Image (spheres, rainbow, N blue to C red):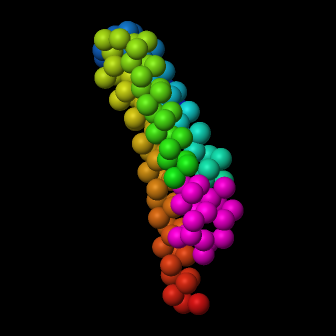
Amino acid sequence: MILLIAVTEVLCAAKGSGWRAPLYWGGAAGIAINLLAVPFVWKIAVLPAAAGRDKAFWKWWGLSFFVRLLSLGGFAFGLCSYFSGQEHVTLLAMMGAYLPGMFVESAWLGRRLVTADTEKKHA
């Protein structure tokens, strides 16, 4: 959040205050999409580690992906409609806030799957 504020203010100082609203709203949408994933990550986290490749894991991960994809499309459509003429600013801010959270989640899930495979081989 602090990084979003810092980047927004630096860009507004360089490009003008007209970018402030699209940057903040786009960043807020990206953060909201990441927060939508939290309940699904909690559900996946309580599944047994050995369940990494079973149906329950993929069901919850797929549902999480579907919810984020729908919200991403909804936010993109709504923000681009509202900030007509500044779509690129809004969408880049949204993706800049969303992608780091997605990469952290992907790394966590990857480590979880690899750990489960390693434990399975050594058991």
Along the viewing direction, whichever of 39 and 105 lies nearer the viewer: 39
Figure check: 107 above or below 53: above
List the single residue furthest toward the right: 46
What secondary structure do most residues of the magenta stretch adopt? Answer: helix
Placement of the C terminus among the 4 image quadrants: bottom right
**63 sits to left or right of 14:** right
Along the viewing direction, whichever of 31 and 17 lies nearer the viewer: 31
Name the residue: 61% across, 63% down: 56
Residue 60 in magenta stretch: yes
x and y percentages locating residue 13 in the rendered image = 36, 15
Name the residue: 47% across, 27% down: 74
Q: Is residue 91 visible?
A: yes
x and y percentages locating residue 23 in the rendered image = 42, 21
Q: Which image quarter: residue 93?
A: top left
Figure check: 55 above or below 60: below
Along the viewing direction, whichever of 118 and 80 lies nearer the viewer: 80
Q: Is residue 12 visible?
A: no
Name the residue: 43% across, 12% down: 82
x and y percentages locating residue 31 in the rendered image = 53, 34
x and y percentages locating residue 88 in the rendered image = 31, 23
Name the residue: 57% across, 65% down: 55
Span highlighted in magenta in the image: 43-61
Figure check: 120 above or below 49: below
